[in-house]
Image: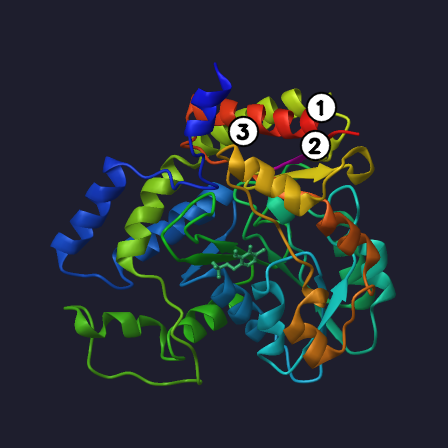
Amino acid sequence: MTTTKLVNLQVPFHRADLGEAEVQAVSDVIRSGWLTMGAKTFEFERQFASYVGASHAIAVSSCTAALHLSLEAIGLSCGDEVLVPTTTFTASAEVVAYFGARPVFVDIDAASMNMDPREAERKITTRTKAIIPVHLAGTPCEMAEITHLADQYRLRVVEDAAHALPSSYKGKRIGTVSELTAFSFYATKTLTTGEGGMITTENEDLVKRLQLMRLHGIARDAWKRYSAEGSWFYEVLDTGYKYNLTDLQAALGIVQLAKCDEMTSARSRIAARYTAAFQSLECVETPHIPADCATSWHLYLLRLQLDQLRIDRGQFIRELAERGVRTSVHFIPLHLQPAYQRNYGYKNGDLPVAEREYQRSLSLPIFSSMREEEIEQVIWAVSEVASHWSR
Ligand SMILES: Cc1ncc(COP(=O)(O)O)c(C=O)c1O
C-alpha cells in the first residue's frame, strides 16, 4: 500500500450499519398504516429486555428523555443534588437541571475515564439524591463501589448507558445492574433507530410511572385510542411528556438488535487491531478495559503522551484529518462549559484529572461497517503522525 493511495481515501468518524433488512422493516410499517407507538414498539421493548436480561424495557424518544423520565420517576426535585461525572455529554447533566436540581460534577478515574467513586463520595451532602454513572465509550463504571455508596448514603442510581450496549460488568449486562438504566439509539450509537432510547428496570412501580409519563401522563392504553381496540375516552393522570418511540423507529431497532452481537464483534476486532498496532508507540496510550468487564466498543479513545510529542492534541487531530481520518473528542468536561460555569459557578481547574485527560484524548473511527482499507488507513495515519511528531 502506498502513502498516496491511502491519503486519497477519506475515513468518516462514523457510518451507520444499515442494510436492506432495515429498509424492508421500515417499509412494512409504512405499508401497515400505523406509524407511531404500537405493536412494533412493544415488540422491540420485549426483545430489548430479553437481550440485556432485564425484566422490563420502556421505549422512549431519546436517551435524554430516558434520563429525564428516570429522574422524574425517582422523585427528583428542586434543590436536590445529583452526582454526574464531568467527562460526559451535556445530556447527562441537563436532565438534572430540568428539575431545578444541581448537577454536582465529579472528577474521573485516570485509567477508565469514568466517574471516580472516591471523588463521588467526597461530593456527597445531605442534599445528594442520586448518582448518574456514565459508562464512557462503553467501558463499565466501577459499579460495585457506586452501588456501595448508594446503599451507604441512601442514594438512587440512574445509569447513563448511552454508550454501553452491549457492555457487561462482572458478568452482568449493563441494564441489569442498577434500578434504572438509560440507553441511546441516536444515529451514531451501537444500535440506531435514528433517534431513540430505552429504559430498563426490574421495578414494576417505576415501569408504571415511566409508561404514564412518556405519553402525556395519560392512562397507559392511550396510544390505542385511534385503533379498533381503543376508545375515545382517556384520562390525564399527571402532566407528562411527549417522549414515546414510534413504530417506524422500533422496526429499525428490531432489525438492529438482531445483529447487535455481530456488530459488537466487528467493533471488538477493530479495537484489537488498533491496540495491537498502537501498543508499541511510546507517544500514545490505548484504552484500559478492566479484566472483569466487557465493553461495547462504542468509542475507541486514544490518549496522547504529550511529553513524547512535539504537537498537541488539536494538531494531532488536524494531522490525522490531512491523512483522511476523521476523529472526535469525548468529551469537553462539562465544568469547563460556559452554561455550567455561569449557572453553577464551576471554574477551570476544579476537576484536574478530567481536564488533563481531555487535553490528551481523541476518539478514532470505530464502526461495524468499517472496511478493511479504512481500518488500515486509520492504523497507518496514527502510526505516521506518531512517528513523524515524536520527540
Ligand atoms: C453519554 C451520553 N449520554 C446521553 C446522551 C444523549 O443521548 P440521546 O441523543 O439519545 O438523547 C448521549 C448522546 O450522545 C451521550 O453520549
Please, what secondary structure does the residue beneath circle 3 have?
helix
Residue 105 spot, x, y in % from top left: 74, 66
Res. 253 in view? yes
User: Given this view, does label 3 or label 2 mark the residue nearer the observer?
Assistant: 3
Amino acid type for the residue under numbered disc 1: Gln
Kindly identify which residue carries mark 1: 279
Side of 293 relative to 23 (left or right): right
In three-dimensional space, the C-alpha distance between marks 1 and 3, rounded to whole angstroms, equals 14 Å
Above or below, 349 relative to 258: below
Residue at image x 81%, y 61%? Answer: 351
In three-dimensional space, the C-alpha distance between marks 3 and 2, rounded to whole angstroms, equals 14 Å
| Colouring method of the image | rainbow
Amino acid type for the residue under numbered disc 2: Thr
Above or below, 291 relative to 148: above
Please, what secondary structure does the residue beneath circle 2 have?
loop
Q: Earlier in the sequence, mark 2 or mark 1?
A: 1
Kindly identify which residue carries mark 2: 286
Above or below, 68 relative to 260: below
Kindly identify which residue carries mark 3: 378
